[in-house]
Image (cartoon, rainbow, N blue to C red):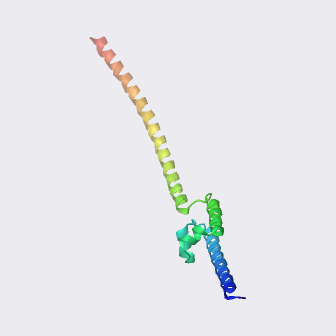
Amino acid sequence: MSKYDRMIEENKKKSKEKIDLAKRAIYELMEEKERITVPKLMRITGLSRGFFYKNEVIRQEMDKAVEQQAGLIDPRREILNMAMEKQIAMLQQQIIGLKKENADLKKENEKLRKALNKKNLNIIKNL
């Protein structure tokens, strides 16, 4: 085996190791339900940005993983949604209370108008 063949074999071996490392990092992020991004993968693996964009095998794995994650909810978003739902429920209760108060005030207003009209009629009759 010539030096060239050994060098090619060594390069293939290193490339396969890098691909395996990147795949493991992608799967770990998926298991932890963390959003998969190239900067995160770079930090975890120490591989270059170009590797993740240029290597077709890894690019396909990333695309599949991101596609699968599209349905997952970011934990922070879930917490915000829960807080918003509580606030909406509280505001709906407040609306119900205000509608009741408004109806009561309308009834009272109508009673006072009738009483005022009666009083005005009595004043006119007494003239």
> Residue 114 or 89: which is nearer the viewer?
89
Q: Who's the residue at 44% across and 40% down the image?
A: 98
Q: Report the side of 11 relative to 105 (left or right).
A: right
Q: Quick one: quadrant of the N terminus? A: bottom right
Q: Nearer the viewer, residue 6 or 69?
A: 6
Q: Quadrant of the C terminus?
A: top left
Rendering coords of residue 52 (x, y %): 58, 70
125 or 87, nearer to the observer: 87
Q: Is residue 122 left or right of residue 98?
A: left
Q: Quadrant of residue 74?
A: bottom right
Q: Is residue 100 above or below residue 90?
A: above
Q: Position of residue 105 (x, y in %)?
A: 41, 33
- Please, which residue is most extreme toward the left here? 127
Question: For the point 37% across and 26% down, which residue is it?
Answer: 112
Give the side of residue 62 with respect to residue 121, left or right: right
Q: Nearer the viewer, residue 114 or 95?
A: 95
Residue reaching furthest to the right: 1
Marker count (numbered): 0
Q: Is residue 112 above or below residue 9?
A: above
| Whole-percent x, y for residue 48 in the image | 54, 74
Residue 14 is drawn in which quadrant? Answer: bottom right
Residue in view at x 63 percent, y 59 percent: 67
Residue at 42% over, 30% down:
106
